[in-house]
Image (tube, coloured by chain):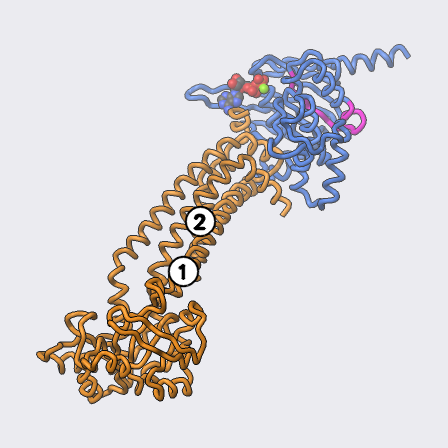
Amino acid sequence: MKYAMLVLKNLLRSKRRTILTVLSIAVSLFIFSALVSLPAVANRVLSDTASSVRVACHNKAGVTYSMPEAYKQRIAMTKHVVAVVPQSWFGGIYHEMSDQFPNFAIDPEQAETMWPDWGVSAEQWQSFRDLRTACLVGPGTMKRFSLHIGQQIQLRGTLYHFNVQLKIVGVMGGKAPPNFLVFRRDYLEEAEGRPGLVDNFWVRVDKSENVPQVIAALDEGFANSSAETKSETEAAFVSTFINQFKFFFQLAEVLGFVVVITIGLVAANTAAMSIRERRGEIAVMRSIGFTSRTILSLLLSESLLIGLIGGIVGCGAAFLVLHLFAVGASAMGAFGDIQMPAFVLVGTLVIAALIGILSALVPAMSASRRNIVDALRTVV
Amino acid sequence: MDSKFAVDLEHVVRTYKRDEFEVHALDDVTIQVPESRFVAIMGPSGSGKTTMLNLIAGIDHPTSGRVAVGGEEITGMKERDLAAWRARHIGLVFQFYNLIPVLTAFENVELPLLLTNLGKAERREHVETALKVVGLADRMDHYPRQLSGGQEQRVAIARAIVTDPTIVVADEPTGDLDAKSAEDILGLMVDLNQQFHKTIVMVTHDPRAERYVDTVYRLDKGVLAGVEPGKRARGAEAAEASA
Ligand SMILES: Nc1ncnc2c1ncn2[C@@H]1O[C@H](COP(=O)(O)OP(=O)(O)O)[C@@H](O)[C@H]1O
Ligand SMILES: [Mg+2]
């Protein structure tokens, strides 16, 4: 600890240089941690929501094409299927166009069996089944619009030319996406004039090992029919959305590393310069009796500190920005609960420490071992 | 080599290789400096004075021969042990003061004490004493750039004596100072020698130095060319004789 003063005084030797180095490391690690968080967040959304026994069955032509509601009975009769819930996207808004959040209609009967992980109580499911205008709302959306249970709300149709009047009967928690709103499809059907179409069927299978068999049975069963189907696990279903961004995620990761390496080289150059300037002083300290090892650890502590401060500043800023972004952008649905994953936080600080130590290692080693007499002669 | 001398060099040779040439910076030098003496090493530029001082200070190694300081042979010591030995026994003063610019006078003087087991309070006490001895107790919080050359050299001397070393070695300590400051520094060295009985080995160009020291060792082209008593010693003898 008695050396702390030495390290600090040397850091403040050239304040501008130290501050610039810290800032450049901070900026690079800000970019790095923000970029690396994106795919990580997307992956976490996947692993959080995807249940291993849920299968999504949608139109083979694409997720935006609908299917006849009559498929429900055929799917329900398939071996190993425990529950079927048809789903239709409503895409309504609360008041303004900017008030977007994911909302859709589902059949109420088997919803509780399908989504036990939504944290909805038995009484609330019961109310959902009893009341034709009932809806369940995620905690994020509840908070965003200051809603409460029992409240009557109106969703304005954007894809549909009508609005729906809903009553909130429960709040979703658990693993439910925080911004969803679900209401009953029989209400939607009626308002629409009963076209009998469905966007997607959710299918619950008895055991996860039977999932491939069910997927095959469904897709073969509907082959050559008016709407052929493509079924996939929930994980795969969610990832078809996320995979659209996969290339960008990879690019983001690569760019993040490039930025870090670039700044690492700049930091190495700065460290080499600052150590070179002090060769004479280092020789004097060694002539006083400081060992090479003590000198080396002093020099490395300095640059470790620079790296870590840069890391904390950069990573902290990214953490805050992501958080603010998440608060402002809950309309993004599943991405609404974006937050820097712990491993990115820890990883970024480790990288910050590595930048600090590695950037100074070579010049610090050679300066601390240099022949004292030579150093005194040439520099002094 | 058991030695009762403060400095004991036996047949010391130091050769530098420069390209194909060998430079004999020191060529078979043998000297003994008794304890508590203030001695000067004098000679023309390039005669090997600094080389000799570096060997005594344990920051350079002889090509052959033996070096003992404070009764301890340092010729074969390992680098780590030698560093610890320097911290305990040697106080170094350089021509250009070589203070650490980012540290205050106090912190510069405290530097060698960081290598000891002394606590903060004890270190402060030692530093204050050393700065008092060199007459700079009122400049403790000044940075080197806020001090004159003479004051910087005093701080450097305080740094050299703060650990109470066996021997103080100084390489042209007055070489960069004006006449007045140079006299002050020489006077300070005499005080250190007389009041605290420090052995001081000083390399110098400065003819004035002869008046202050006990013995002058003259080097020429790496060879010991003569050993003479300094004028101080002669003055003391004269005073004794007339009494
Ligand atoms: N590291 C070195 N490499 C080559 N030659 C050296 C080195 N150090 C000293 N010398 C040579 O050794 C001789 C003595 O040098 P030095 O002890 O510095 O003399 P002084 O201090 O008396 O001026 C000089 O000729 C010098 O050039
Ligand atoms: Mg010299």
Q: Residue at x 42, y 76 (%)?
A: A173
> Which amino acid lies under the numbered mark 1 shown in the image of this protein?
Gly
Q: Amino acid at mark 2?
A: Leu
- Residue A39, percent across and down? 33, 60
A25 w.r.t. B170: above or below: below
The answer to whether A179 appears left or right of B98 in the picture is left
- Give the image location of residue A154, x and y in percent: 35, 74
Q: Which residue lies under the disc numbered 2?
A: A354
Tally the marks. Answer: 2
Query: In front: mark 2 or mark 1?
Result: 1
User: Which of the two discs, 2 and 1, labels the residue nearer the N terminus?
Assistant: 1
Query: In front here: A223 or B147?
Result: A223
* Residue at position x 45%, y 36% in the image: A272
The residues colored magenta run B191-204
Residue B19: quarter of image: top left
Chain A's shade in the image? orange
Other residues around mark 1 within 10 Å, as few (<14) / some (14–19) / many (≥20)? few
Image position of B238 (left or right of A364) = right
Circles 2 and 1 on the same chain? yes
Numbered mark located on residue A328 in the image: 1
| Quadrant of the rendering where the C terminus of chain B is positioned | top right
Q: CA distance from mark 2 to mark 1?
A: 34 Å
Indicate yes or no whether the magenta region holds residue A140. Answer: no
Q: Among the chains, which one is blue?
A: B
Q: Does any portion of residue B18 appear in the rendered image? A: yes
